[in-house]
Amino acid sequence: MTILIDKDQVISSPALVPTERDLARDHGVELTIGLVNNMPDPALKATERQFMKLLQAAAGPCRIRFHCFSLPSVKRSPEARWHVESEYSDLSDLKKQKFDGLIVTGAEPVAPELDQEPYWRDLTELIDWAKANTRSTIWSCLAAHAAVLHLDGIARRRLPAKCHGIFDCDVVTSDSMTHAAPAPLKVSHSRLNEIAESDLVQAGYQVLTRSETAGVDVFVRQYASRFVFFQGHPEYDALSLQREYLRDIGRYLARERDNYPRLPVGYFDAATEEKLARFEKKAAHQRHPALTNELPGLNLRADIDAGSAAAVLFRNWLQYLSAETEASIPARQSKDVGSALGLPRR
């Protein structure tokens, strides 16, 4: 399904379709962008909203045609499958046209190794297609790990503990993606694995941002398409990490995981961290799903600055796509005029 995003348009649903009058308006540069949303069912709709709002805020004078897809081999609940089938375009439609930009999210892992995931074949075919059929593609979190494994055989490494929280990331390479970025960039990370910077540099990737604590954040590689990789989640809203943390507490209390989740780094305020520490001790002795009803009220730190990194990165990404699009317009116009005049093609 196609969603038209204009700067002043209020986004309510991925089912929002433009009218013929909207399509006739002149908005200058027009970009076609796809989101391949493979996030787990509880985060599926939130991820749609996050990326659409980011693109809307970053669009400026651009007009964006936004298409939602999902890998068909990602396992879904009946409700989530109905949502994807009714609101998203079929993945086969993606490969029938060229996209200016593509965003590919990760999926919740179900296999010990990435290349054993049920969606591995679909994902690697998408990686190969995107190299030649987009101007630039963003690979987010697990999708970034899968892409570098497929492209260069770089395997991710298991972390001793989950990297979970908001981390200060520094720009280490001057690049259009990080133009006018605040120092530091505060970025959400939520992952159990990492790609080592030494492996990326040796294979020819360029690291743009990193955190002393969380490691590599954003890195890039140029093919026919410019591939941009996020180990973090700059698109996360202020409550995304809270939802994940509470989900993991629920899984612990339901005995679906062995270990109690660690607090997200740099996220809750000091008073909340104290209350959550007391709750953890209680949960260890009264491990039962009903205990979630006794979770304390949660307050975030005042300085998390959610969305600031994403605003910069996505504005710069759209400007890159717009510049590439505008550069190709004179060549296309010249070709069209030549065809109209009956001139031979060269």
Image (cartoon, helix red, strand yellow):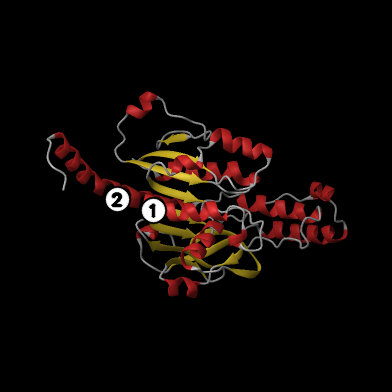
Per the rendering, the mark at residue 104 is: none
Q: Secondary structure at mark 2?
A: helix
Residue name at image x 30 percent, y 32 percent: 26
Residue 70: x percent and y percent?
54, 44
Q: Nearer the viewer, residue 79 or 97?
A: 97
* Res 266 seen here: no
- The answer to whether residue 38 shows anywhere in this view is yes
Give above or below for 25 relative to 248.
Answer: above
Residue under numbered circle 2? 324
Q: CA distance from mark 1 to mark 2?
A: 10 Å
Q: Which residue is mark 1?
A: 136
| Along the line of sight, the residue nearer the viewer: 337 or 228 | 337
- Where disc 1 sits, the SS reads strand
Query: Where residue 306 sits: x, y (%)?
Result: 54, 52
**Can you say whether 207 is above or below 336 in the image?**
below
Q: Which amino acid, mark 1?
A: Ser
Q: Residues within 10 Å of mark 1 (few under 14, many from 20)?
A: many
* Picture quadrant of residue 266: bottom right
**Residue farthest to the right?**
285
The structure residue drawn at horizontal position 36% and vertical position 62%, both measured from the top left corner, is: 175
Q: Position of residue 169 (x, y in %)?
A: 49, 65
The vertical placement of 342 against 182, above or below, is above
The type of residue carrying mark 2 is Glu
Q: Is residue 85 left or right of residue 10?
A: right
Labels 1 & 2 near each other (Cβ < 8 A): yes
The answer to which of 2 and 278 lies nearer the viewer is: 2
Residue 83 location, quadrant: top right
Q: Earlier in the sequence, mark 1 or mark 2?
A: 1
Task: Report the number of discs.
Answer: 2
Residue 240 place in picture, x, y as percent = 61, 50
